[in-house]
Image (spheres, helix red, strand yellow):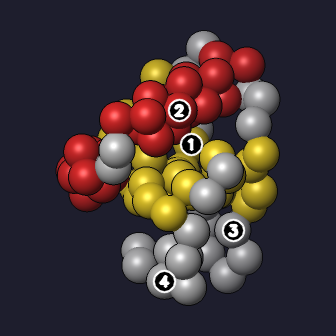
Amino acid sequence: MKSVILSTSAAKDMDALPRSARETIETALYRYATTGYGDVKALTGREGYRLRIGHYRVIFAEDEMTVLAVYVGRRSTMTYRRN
């Protein structure tokens, strides 16, 4: 089981989301950290991964012990350029 850590900017992104979206994203992140299940793809052109949760995306990095979320938000044209 991996631990989930939110960067400062990801925590602010989560706080700005509606409660239902926040709960759905938290559930999906913890499910991925514990089971490895989720719609995850490696990013192209840079290191990291994205977890797709409906219209939302979580950009993250991971190692053997942690999943570090860097960005959380709705999918837009700027989602993958932001960080």
Residue 63 position within the rendered picture, expressed as x and y whole percent measured from the top left: 58, 38
Mark 2 / mark 1, whichever is N-terminal: 2
Q: Are marks 1 and 4 in contact (CB under 8 Å)?
A: no
Mark 4 / mark 3, whichever is N-terminal: 3
**Mark 3 — residue?**
43
Q: Secondary structure at mark 2?
A: helix
At 61% from the left and 58% from the top, the residue drawn is 55
Q: Secondary structure at mark 4?
A: loop
Inspect this view and state whether residue 33 appears. no
**Mark 4 — residue?**
78
Mark 1 / mark 4, whichever is N-terminal: 1
Residue 41 position within the rendered picture, expressed as x and y whole percent measured from the top left: 77, 56
Q: Tag 2: residue type?
A: Thr
Closer to the eye: label 1 or 3 = 3
Closer to the eye: label 2 or 4 = 2
Q: Quadrant of the N terminus?
A: top right
**Mark 1 — residue?**
62
Measured Cα–Cα span from mark 3 to mark 2 = 22 Å
Q: Tag 3: residue type?
A: Leu
Numbered marks: total: 4
Left or right of 8? Residue 76 is: right
**Front position in the image: 74 or 82:** 74
